[in-house]
Image (spheres, rainbow, N blue to C red):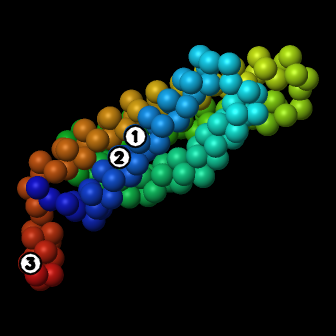
């Protein structure tokens, strides 16, 4: 099973997705607890801030890295790659739009009164859960593409590159 294909590290893509899935599970559990129990507003706000930071820093960076390496490889080397790459790009745009709305609503929460803020925080929890669900669905699709790459026979340049490294 090849660990690199078409100039990309499949292991790096898989590791990135495993970390994302772990982060999604952790954050989803945190949001579930916050939405079902009487949790102080400060704790909910901190959890949402952590989530906002994760979305803006780590997730958006992950999307950019994929678009620079993984998406072009999908487009060029997989059967139906154009359509698969188009789906990845569409998913990324949808995630970016959802994150931007979340970030805007989170900022707005600090400018409203207590009653409105409470309502807005619960709305933010729901929006965060939707983003996490989008992300899980998207990661499953990309993992299926990684498996397609792994099934591909190694290219001659990859075989000679690994032979010379030994």
Q: Nearer the viewer, residue 85 or 41?
A: 41
Is residue 68 in view from this perspective? yes
In the rendered structure, find residue 21 and report the number of the disc placed on it: 1
* Mark 3 residue element: helix
* Mark 1 residue element: helix
Residue at 22% x, 62% y is: 4
Residue 83, percent across and down?
A: 32, 36
Q: Which residue is mark 3?
A: 163
Q: Quadrant of residue 49?
A: top right
Label pair 1/2, CB-CB below 8 angstroms? yes
Alpha carbon of mark 3 to alpha carbon of mark 2: how far? 29 Å
Q: In the rendered view, does 72 fall on the left or right side of 10?
A: right
Binning the other alpha carbons within 10 Å of mark 1 as few (below 14), some (14 to 19) or many (20 upward) gives some
Alpha carbon of mark 3 to alpha carbon of mark 1: how far? 34 Å
Residue at 32% x, 41% y is: 142
Residue 54, percent across and down?
A: 58, 46
């Amino acid at each position: 099973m090849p660990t690199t294909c078409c100039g990309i590290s499949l292991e790096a893509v898989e590791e990135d997705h495993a970390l994302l899935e772990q982060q999604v599970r952790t954050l989803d559990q945190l949001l579930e607890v916050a939405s079902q129990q009487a949790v102080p507003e400060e704790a909910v706000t901190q959890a949402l801030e952590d989530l906002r930071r994760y979305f803006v820093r780590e997730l958006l960076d992950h999307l950019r890295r994929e678009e620079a390496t993984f998406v072009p490889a999908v487009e060029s080397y997989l059967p139906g790659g154009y359509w698969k790459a188009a789906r990845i790009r569409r998913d990324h745009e949808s995630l970016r739009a959802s994150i931007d709305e979340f970030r805007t609503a989170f900022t707005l929460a600090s400018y409203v009164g207590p009653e409105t803020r409470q309502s807005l925080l619960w709305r933010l929890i729901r929006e965060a859960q939707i983003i996490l669900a989008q992300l899980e669905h998207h990661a499953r699709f990309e993992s299926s593409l990684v498996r397609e790459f792994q099934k591909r026979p190694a290219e001659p340049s990859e075989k000679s590159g690994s032979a010379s490294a030994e």
